[in-house]
């Protein structure tokens, strides 16, 4: 029995609340994970888990052992990493980000990163909803906006400047708003995952202006926001990188330039630990370096 492998399976089973999920993550079978944890229990002479059809819960002995396992696995990782320099980043980097940001800002940069760190493999999960880093088994998430979870470490790596845009065709039909308050007379495309909902915030010369907007279309998908704007459905407040090429070509027009929508920070977010593998720190440094040179972020 490989004690370290069994400990890893035990810890992930608690974090994911599922033997099957651990099996999928490790590309093995559910019976294999079950046997590993059963082997631990036999070796220790105690029951660690109480299993039901829908849940895994720790016994008192299991709670103590779980804490020790976390410390042991961190120490092993730290010991291994101490023998490698930063250039020795290695392993699978499980990365999470929103769909359109991943498509437009992360994936196009991966070839450069992988060329620099050929021993790192990227496992990218893209979703336009709040991803639980622990439950999804992610090493790192890239998030846009303020971070509220104090259990995570966040490192600011860029800024998303936002603009108010629509197609020229829309403005020809509906006219151009001259102030944020005039948006109430327009079809506004609302991104429902924005923390402020349909209340858009602008920075004017006299302070923050808040406007309740509405329209005939709203969505929780960043891809759908982009498609809706390009199909003349209305006005949207969006990250400038979402339409950089279209703005440069003149396909879209930026309005309300004297009233800037609130910019949003870009953070790299990861779990608290005594040790952070080189694959994490290298990717954070890489993105921060890339974004510093990119006028859109």
Image: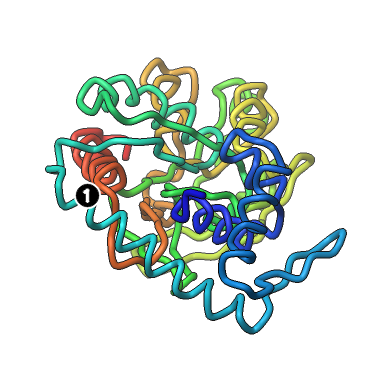
Instruction: Name the residue nearer the viewer: 216 or 292.
Output: 292
Q: Quadrant of the C terminus?
A: top left
> Can residue 47 be seen here?
yes
Instruction: Name the residue nearer the viewer: 153 or 288.
Output: 153
Q: SS class of the residue under badge 1? A: helix
Residue 53 left/right relative to 11:
right
Looking at the image, residue 47 lies above or below residue 12: below
Residue furthest toward the bottom?
Answer: 60
Q: Residue at x 46, y 39 (%)?
A: 255
Counting from the top left corner in percent of width and height, residue 237 is at 53, 44
Residue 243 left/right relative to 279:
right
What number of labels is visible?
1
Q: Residue at x 69, y 60 (%)?
A: 17
Counting from the top left corner in percent of width and height, residue 123 is at 48, 33
Instruction: Name the residue nearer the viewer: 44 or 82.
Output: 44
Res. 181 image quadrant = bottom right
Counting from the top left corner in percent of width and height, residue 196 is at 60, 62
Counting from the top left corner in percent of width and height, residue 254 is at 44, 34
Residue 38 left/right relative to 136:
right
Instruction: Name the residue nearer the viewer: 283 or 64.
Output: 64
Looking at the image, residue 258 lies above or below residue 171: below
Res. 43 image quadrant = bottom right
Q: Residue at x 29, y 42 (%)?
A: 279
Q: Residue at x 61, y 51 (%)?
A: 36
In this picture the colour scheme is rainbow
- Residue at mark 1: 81
Q: Residues within 10 Å of mark 1 (few under 14, many from 20)?
A: some
């Amino acid at each position: 029995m490989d004690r370290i492998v069994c400990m890893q399976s035990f810890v992930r089973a608690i974090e994911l609340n599922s033997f099957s999920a651990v099996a999928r993550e490790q590309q093995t079978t559910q019976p294999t994970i079950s046997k590993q944890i059963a082997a631990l229990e036999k070796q220790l002479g105690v029951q660690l888990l109480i299993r039901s059809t829908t849940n895994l819960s720790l016994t008192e002995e299991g709670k103590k052992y779980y804490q020790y396992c976390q410390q042991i696995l961190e120490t092993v990782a730290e010991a291994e990493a101490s023998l490698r320099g930063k250039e020795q980043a290695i392993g699978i980097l499980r990365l999470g980000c929103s769909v359109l940001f991943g498509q437009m800002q992360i994936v196009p940069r991966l070839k450069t990163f992988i060329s620099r760190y050929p021993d790192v493999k990227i496992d990218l999960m893209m979703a336009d909803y709040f991803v639980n880093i622990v439950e999804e088994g992610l090493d790192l998430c890239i998030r846009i906006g303020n971070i509220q979870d104090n259990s995570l470490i966040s490192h600011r790596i860029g800024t998303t400047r936002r603009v108010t845009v629509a197609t020229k065709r829309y403005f020809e039909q509906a006219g151009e708003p001259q102030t944020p308050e005039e948006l109430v007379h327009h079809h506004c495309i609302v991104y429902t995952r924005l923390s402020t909902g349909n209340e858009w915030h602008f920075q004017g010369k006299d302070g923050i202006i808040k406007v309740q907007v509405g329209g005939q279309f709203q969505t929780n998908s960043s891809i759908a926001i982009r498609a809706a704007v390009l199909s003349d459905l209305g006005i949207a407040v969006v990250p400038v990188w979402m339409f950089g090429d279209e703005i440069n070509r003149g396909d879209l027009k930026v309005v309300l330039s004297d009233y800037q929508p609130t910019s949003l920070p870009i953070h790299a977010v990861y779990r608290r630990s005594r040790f952070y593998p080189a694959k994490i720190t290298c990717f954070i440094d890489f993105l921060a370096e890339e974004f510093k040179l990119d006028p859109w972020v």
